[in-house]
Each structure stands twice: as C-alpha cells, then as structure tokens.
Amino acid sequence: MEIISIGNELLIGKTLNTNAYWMAKRATSLGIMVKRITIVSDDVDEIANAVCEALQRKPRFIITTGGLGPTFDDKTLEGIAKALNIKLEVNEKALKMVREKYEAFAKAGRIEKAELTPPRVKMAKLPKNSEPLPNPVGTAPAMIIDVHKTFLIALPGVPSEMEAIFEQSVAPLLGKEAGENMFFETSIYADDVMESVLAPLIDQTMHDNSYVYIKSHPKGEEGKPHMEIHFSTTAKDSKTAKDRLGKAIIQLSELIEKNGGKVKAKKRS
C-alpha cells in the first residue's frame, strides 16, 4: 500500500501530516504493510506524476488524501484523471450525495439555499468509471477506481472526514485483503548501550527471527544512551505472534546484557 498526501500546506510546514500518520497506523493494524508515503503540492502535474509512479510499482492500494473540495486549489481528481488518461465527468451517484448534503444543511438552517452551484458540482466530477464513496461527515464524496488490480482511492484532507470514510469504506477492503493476518507490536528499553553497538545485535536477532521486525529509537541524552527497541510481527493469531516476539526479545535482551547494557520492559519515568 502507498499513501499520497496532497497539499501545499504540508510542504511549507503549515500543517502537520497527521492524516498519513493515522492512516499508516490504522492500515498496519489491519495487517497491511505501508511501503511508501509521498507528499506533493496542489498541482495537477505533480499529482499525476506521483500517481503514475506509484502505479508502476503495482501496489494493491494507493490512497490519496486532500484536494477533493470545491475550491480552485482542490485538484486531486483532475490529477488522477490525467494520470489515468481519462476524463472527469459528473458522476450521478456523487451528485446525488452532494445534493442531499446541501439539502440537509439548508433544512437545518446552516445555509440559505441548497442550490448546486458550480463549485458544489465540482465535488461530483470524478474520473470516468470510478465509484463515489459516501462521506458521512462532510460534503465531498471520496472515490475509488480499479486500475489493473490496484485500488486507487481518493479521500478528503479534513481529518474527521478522512477517518470516517476510511473506517466505513476502506478498512473493510484492507481487512479482506489482509485475510486473517493481524499486526502485533511491543517495546523494550535498553540503557548503557550505544546504538552503534546495538545495531549488529539487532541484525543478528532479526536474522534468527525472520518474522520479526526490530527497530531502535534513541531516547537518551549525550553520554547517557537510552533506547526504545520496537518489535513487530504479522501473524494469524495472537499466540503465534507472542511466541515470535517473546523469542526475539529474549535473544536480543541476552545479547544486550552480554555487551554491558541493561534491559527494561517499560520506559523509565
């Protein structure tokens, strides 16, 4: 799976890319491996290039976030259409979704008229042959299209909308793809061992425990090494996962202690 985050605000540092963080963590929890996260500007060519490059790698899923709204700089769908060399057209299902949203807003007194203005219709213009995904929180529908066995999905950039659509329409697809696989993780903490000393010990442990991924994260200060060591695996049941993680933790802990380090199960306060 690949994630493409779209928005100038992400590139100039105005907005933290919490969408990619949330989605990567959620997809991983469903048993799906995220292999790449890309950030591009609100530019049709940049979006198209990013989509084309991702498609060449043939991931099962490509998910974009941002750029589905009614404003001039919401160009994601135009970029996707260019990448796929297809036209944008008003999707009747999407238009119905947009219309019903504005009618509800008008009935609730949030807007005066439910008129489908050009900016509002813009949100219903999708690449040909794509399917709209309902937005239970906001106005702009999301979109999904099958491109040679890669599901290309476009989600809004507003976090509450992105998360709601993901849980309702995307998570079931990812779960089905992952099958029975589930993601498991845990951490230990090591003191008094430099990362340069720790690195070959991790390599040896991963070599001996091929289903476990181990990553060190320095947390200490200069001269006071303190490492979080994160262990993760994907398995079909919790017993298998716990056995794998437990074996790797024991092996690495023993290696660390032989090299003068100290291991703790929990982070020191």
Image (spheres, helix red, strand yellow):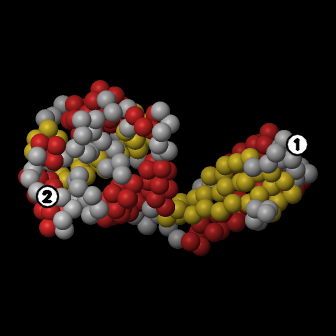
Residue type at mark 1 is Gly
**Residue 112 marker:** 2
Image position of 268 with respect to 158: above or below: below
In percent of the image, x 65 and y 57: which residue is there?
Answer: 231
In percent of the image, x 29 and y 62: which residue is there?
Answer: 137
Location of residue 64 (image quadrant): top left
Location of residue 105 (image quadrant): bottom left
Residue type at mark 2 is Glu
In percent of the image, x 69 and y 60: which residue is there?
Answer: 187
At label 2, counting other C-alpha atoms closer than 10 Å, the crowd grade (few under 14, some 14-19, many 20 or more) is few
Q: Can residue 134 be seen in this view?
A: yes
Q: Is residue 94 left or right of residue 198?
A: left
Image position of 59 with respect to 253: above or below: above
Q: In this view, does 56 lie to the left or right of 111?
A: right
**Residue 54 pos. (x, y %):** 37, 36
Location of residue 56 (image quadrant): top left
Asked which secondary structure carries label 1, the reply is loop
- First in residue order: circle 1 vs circle 2: 2
Residue occupying the far bottom of the picture = 239
Asked which secondary structure carries label 2, the reply is loop
Q: Can residue 34 be seen in this view?
A: no
Q: Is residue 227 left or right of residue 1?
A: right
- Residue that carries the numbered disc 1 in the rendered image: 223
